Image: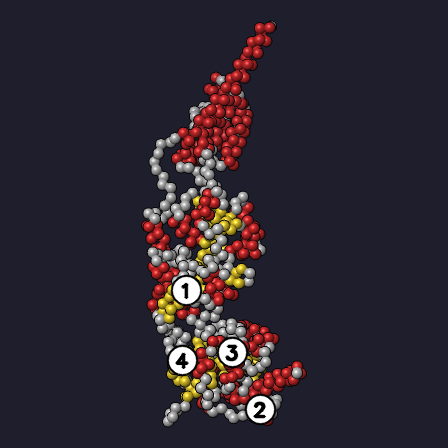
Amino acid sequence: MAFEGMVTYISRVITLLVVVMAAAATTAAAAEVFVLTRHDDFQRCNTWCGSGRSLTTRLRKGDIRMAMEDFPKGVFPSRLVLQAVEDAISVMMRDGLVVVLHDGQSNTENVLQGVLASLGVQLILVDLGYPGVTEAVWLGDFNSAFYVHLLIFDDPATVEDFLEWVPEHTWAPRQLLLLNINWSLNATTILSHPRLRHSSFLTLLQPHLKIGGEPAYRILTYETFKPGNKIVHRGNLSPSSSFSSLFPDRFSTFHGHHFQISSWIDDFPYIIKGETLNDTYGIGVNMLNDIANIYNFTYQLSEQSEDGMWGDLSNGSWRGMIGEVKRGDRDFCINVMSITRDQFRAVDFSVPYNVDGFSFLLRNPLPPPRWWSIVFPLSWEAWIAVLVCVLTLPWPLFLLVKLDVASPSQVHRESKVSLNRMYLEVMKIVLHQNSMQPSSVTSVRIFLGVWFLAAMVLFISYTGNLVAYITVPAKPQMLTMVDQLAEADVIPIMLDYGTFIPALLNASKDPTLKKLGEKLLLVDDNSDMAFDMVHKGYAFLEGAEYFRYIVITHRVTNVYFLQEMLFPTYIGWIFPKNTAWKHKFDLYIQRFVETGFISFWKKWLADNLRKEMNLTEGAGVKQERRPLNLDDLKGVFLVYLAGLVAVLVAGTSEILHHHQDLIISGRK
């Protein structure tokens, strides 16, 4: 049986190639054909399509090696059928690479022979009657808009068998043209087959012979949402037909269809609950209302998903709103959904209309003690540099003055030059006090001049910053980056509402994100409890846009957002896989983005929320005029107290030393 199947397969391929080659011998035009029956064939074709190089069998004059007697016997199709196929392929080639599927019947192969004989085209041929074609997973790689599918059939049973057995999402061409070459058969019912509902553009060319009239091919399409008879006649095929006339818009209106939408009415600024469910508003609802008015449909939102989850993959199945849409329980979802790899494989996304991510909320660290204000004007490095200068400069100054014996100053003559005196002179310059009289020695003048200039800069810088630090509290040191949070002794928390973030963190290969995933603690879906934990030192993780909303509405204070956002991604609406009418929503969502409505609505909603909360944009702690208190000047008194202690110690030491000298002198 295996040998007979192989023989059948080889004979079928050879037969079709002979048909094509024989046709090419009668014309100077070159036809490029690729016959797909195996996965290897698809790999070669994929390389050909991607590189622009033809790996197909080239058919030209003089390439015929087989006799015409091997050509399949049968009645040749009429010129009208050939003309219809040629017109259809010519129109389809304007918009992409043509994939021709056929039922393998002799009449169908005759049609292909005639077309290839008159057209120089690039075609991908797939025989639907070949065993195992319904299990060919590579069929799904031709579903993109780059390919235009033409299904030619003489026997609808073969096509129906193929549609019945092929997996639902394996073969779902975006543009599909069905062409019936059997004039005695009305194949209009095939348009309603469930497997064809995923094609955005679906047309049947049905032969029609009116009594007393000219035979013609009628252009029929299937309007999914049209009440009653959904099959609509959109004119006849002609050589002047355009792509838009060959593939008429079957979703120009939704005929008042009522959509069931999966939603979660607590997703600022995208979906915000009003007084009732019908009063819901937000960016997503605004877009949905405008699109509904254009395409004539109604909708019903849901309070939240049935299982109370947002949308994550658990034990191999999707939960939450993603699960509802994927299973077909709901038509689509307008909540914010991040476009990630796993979610993109499960559902279809609209064009992205915004960028959102996840942010951490942390408690403001305690500010440093106010008495440290006398130290804050300079950094520790600057203080060390000043201290080194004060301790070392008196030594070279002392040596220079000691060498000034030729022209001693008045001060030198009145007092003894000592190292202690030089320390006092250096400190006088720093504190802007009267210093020693100018020396007649050039080196001393230069030395003191340079130190005067440096001390002036230090004095002005310190006093200027000191005023600011005393009157305005110093800002505490805050975390800004995710890696800082991962290394800090802070436990991140997140509400357990079924999002993909915990699994994504744990599966991450980035050591920082992996560490955050290991530390992440899931808590009950209670924002108030989470905010209380933030004030106890935890880091709260939530969606960035929504997070700012709940911080405002809960009037949370003494907190800040981590500057770096986690997983910033594009967001969009989600639809069931291979939704035929998704492109109608994409068109207007993209227009909302390009015209700036998304940014406008976001700003308007935020401003409106602040007005309702009696807040102003950028409102913070208002600085009022106040007198300086003891906390502001505590540092000065502490320094003075330390000085008194030093005086007491020094004085006690001197008294004891003087008393000891008196005792010694008395003994003498």
Q: How far is disc 4 from disc 2 in space, using C-alphas?
A: 38 Å
For the residues bearing labels 4 and 2, Cβ distance under 8 angstroms: no
Q: Residue at x 47, y 20 (%)?
A: 411
Dot 2 or dot 3, earlier in sequence = 2
Q: How far is disc 4 from disc 3 in space, using C-alphas?
A: 19 Å
Dot 4 or dot 2, earlier in sequence = 2
Q: Amino acid at mark 2?
A: Phe
Residue where numbered disc 4 is placed: 231
Q: Nearer the viewer, mark 1 or mark 2?
A: 1
Q: How is the image coloured?
A: secondary structure
Q: Residue at x 46, y 90 (%)?
A: 184
**Secondary structure found at label 4:** strand
Q: Residue at x 56, y 9 (%)?
A: 662
In the figure, is residue 212 to the left or right of 171?
Answer: left
Residue where numbered disc 1 is placed: 261
Asked if residue 338 shows in the view, the reply is no
Dot 4 or dot 1, earlier in sequence = 4
Residue where numbered disc 2 is placed: 71
For the residues bearing labels 2 and 3, Cβ distance under 8 angstroms: no
Residue 299 percent coordinates (x, y): 37, 66
Q: How far is disc 4 from disc 1 in space, using C-alphas?
A: 27 Å
**Secondary structure found at label 2:** loop
Near-viewer residue (635 or 397): 635
Q: How far is disc 1 from disc 2 in space, using C-alphas?
A: 56 Å
Residue where numbered disc 3 is placed: 163
Dot 1 or dot 3, earlier in sequence = 3
For the residues bearing labels 1 and 2, Cβ distance under 8 angstroms: no
Q: Amino acid at mark 1?
A: Ile
